[in-house]
Image (spheres, grey):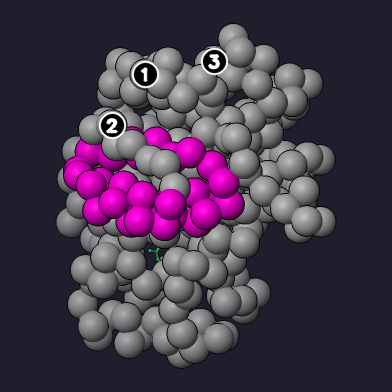
Amino acid sequence: MYLESLFGLEGKVAVVTGGGRGIGQVVARGLAKAGAEIAILCRSGADETVSLIEADGGKACFLKTDVTKEEEVEKAMRAIVDRSGSLDIVFNNAGVCMHQDTMDATVEEFREVVDINLTGEFIVARTAIRIMLERKTKGSIINMASMSGSIVNVPQWQVSYNASKAGVIHMTRSLAAEFAKTGIRVNSLSPGYIATPMSADTPKELRDAWMPLIPMHRMGDPEELMPAILYLASGAAGYTSGSDVIVDGAYTCI
Ligand SMILES: NC(=O)c1ccc[n+]([C@@H]2O[C@H](COP(=O)([O-])OP(=O)(O)OC[C@H]3O[C@@H](n4cnc5c(N)ncnc54)[C@H](O)[C@@H]3O)[C@@H](O)[C@H]2O)c1
């Protein structure tokens, strides 16, 4: 009962972007288990996530949305409010990564990563804030950053990803300060290496090279992000805004 009063999300409506697989899928499921109704905004399918949540006894829907397209995001979020009557939590998670030496990358590729990871998160956050302001909702927005927003990963080079995630951390602080007086909280999450389809797409030699660099000598499980996200999403974090919560097996300590 005490824990539920702190972290429970009963009656809340949560948007999860990029919830078709990976971290987004696990978090959508976790937020539903904590009591929230879930709307997944993703450019690829998310039927599996919806089925998993429904099998757990939760409520979820999927709206095909590209987070870089403001009209699509606006339409999807308005549809959620019409259908569910609220918009309380946003897990702003959709993202991509390109491993490339800087001299091999094209400007178009750099733009694509920044467009999805930073501009896309801005579009999602600002649209949600606009709706929360209209409805006087004291909502919580959690922007997906990364430890790559404050360190430079090795041995792979990924300038576009690192720059985009550094941008997410400072965008979060900027939005948190600007909207603090409205009761809307904006925080970011910075995971280290997490075992998902995104990281599984990287060659095994590269993943093997990461292990000695991680003080815990293992990748994180997406479930291990859930407690931090529950904290940021819930009333427990009522005085927390503009924070970047690092969950990285101590990677950024060394
Ligand atoms: N996996 C890691 O090690 C790790 C570490 C730190 C941060 N992150 C961040 O966590 C987030 C999720 O990563 P993941 O590993 O689960 O990745 P993933 O590739 O498994 O999932 C990403 C999801 O985002 C969706 N997506 C991509 N572009 C989109 C767009 N324009 N519009 C809507 N949806 C879009 C994809 O369809 C996919 O469902 C990303 O922002 C990533 O940068 C991941």
Instruction: Work out whether mark 1 precedes mark 3 in sequence or the reverse, and give the earlier one.
Output: 1
**Residue ID at (35%, 85%):** 209
Q: To which residue does mark 1 refer?
A: 79
Q: Which residues are magenta?
A: 29-57
Disc 1 CB within 8 Å of nearest ligand 1 atom:
no
Mark nearer the N terminus (2 vs 1) = 2
Q: Is residue 7 left or right of residue 86?
A: right
Contact, mark 2 vs mark 1 (Cβ under 8 Å): yes
Q: Is residue 87 visible?
A: yes
Report helix, strand or loop for mark 2: strand
Along the viewing direction, whichever of 55 and 131 lies nearer the viewer: 55
Q: Earlier in the sequence, mark 2 or mark 3?
A: 2
Residue at horizontal 42%, vertical 15%? 82
**Mark 3 crowd level (few <14, some 14–19, many ≥20, 10 Å Cα):** few
Q: Which residue is mark 2?
A: 63
Which class describes the residues within 10 Å of circle 2: few (<14), some (14-19), or many (20+)?
many
Nearer the observer, disc 2 or disc 3?
A: 2
| Residue 130 - label | 3
Q: Are marks 2 and 3 in contact (CB under 8 Å)?
A: no
Mark 1–mark 3 distance (CA, rounded to whole Å)? 14 Å
State how far apart marks 2 and 1 are (Cα): 9 Å
Quarter of the image with the N terminus is bottom right
